Image (spheres, grey):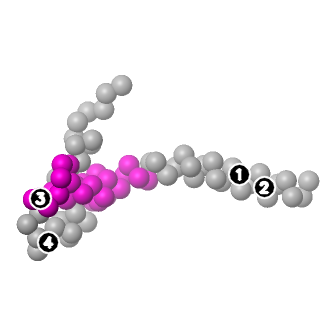
């Protein structure tokens, strides 16, 4: 019985993290780096506009909201 409790705890944590990871991934792609060198919608790996602007600094790129967040979600 002593070995079952740690295994159950690990299994519970793994299932929780598996469901939590898509939420974190979705939060990380709210802004897209756009420009001549990027396809549409661009490099959408930025969680904040400040992060995107820092990456665009000194280049011929600009930042925009990811189209997945700009359009209302359909059900």
Residue position marked by numbered label 3 in the rendering:
35
Q: Which residues are magenta?
A: 24-50
Q: Indicate the secondary structure of the residue bearing disc 3.
A: strand
Tell me what residue is drawn at x 43 percent, y 53 percent: 24
Disc 3 crowd rating (10 Å Cα; few below 14, some 14-19, many 20+) is some
Point out residue 39 in the picture as x, y percentages from the top left corner: 18, 52
Q: Which mark is residue 41?
A: none
> Is residue 21 in sight in this rendering?
yes
| Magenta stretch holds residue 59 | no
Q: Quadrant of residue 38?
A: bottom left
Q: Please, which residue is most extreme toward the right here?
A: 1
N-terminal of the pair, mark 3 or mark 1, is: 1
Q: Are marks 2 and 1 in contact (CB under 8 Å)?
A: yes
Between 74 and 44, the one lying in front of the other is 44
Point out residue 58 in the picture as x, y percentages from the top left corner: 11, 74
Q: Are marks 4 and 1 in contact (CB under 8 Å)?
A: no
Q: Please, which residue is most extreme toward the bottom here?
A: 58
N-terminal of the pair, mark 4 or mark 3, is: 3
Q: Is 70 left or right of 2, judged from the image as shown? A: left
Residue position marked by numbered label 1 in the rendering:
11
Q: Which mark is residue 7?
A: 2
Which part of the image, by quadrant, shows the C terminus? top left
Disc 1 crowd rating (10 Å Cα; few below 14, some 14-19, many 20+) is few
N-terminal of the pair, mark 4 or mark 1, is: 1
Tell me what residue is drawn at x 38 percent, y 49 percent: 26
Q: Indicate the secondary structure of the residue bearing disc 1.
A: helix
Q: Is residue 39 above or below residue 37?
A: above
How many angstroms separate mark 2 from mark 1 (CA)?
A: 6 Å
| Magenta stretch holds residue 37 | yes
How many angstroms separate mark 4 from mark 1 (CA)?
A: 44 Å
Residue position marked by numbered label 4 in the rendering:
57
């Amino acid at each position: 019985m002593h070995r079952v409790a740690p295994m159950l705890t690990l299994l519970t944590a793994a299932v929780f993290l598996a469901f939590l990871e898509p939420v974190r991934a979705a939060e990380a792609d709210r802004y897209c780096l756009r420009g001549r060198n990027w396809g549409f919608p661009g490099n959408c790996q930025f969680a904040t506009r400040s992060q995107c602007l820092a990456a665009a600094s000194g280049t011929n790129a600009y930042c925009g909201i990811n189209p997945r967040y700009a359009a209302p979600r359909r059900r």
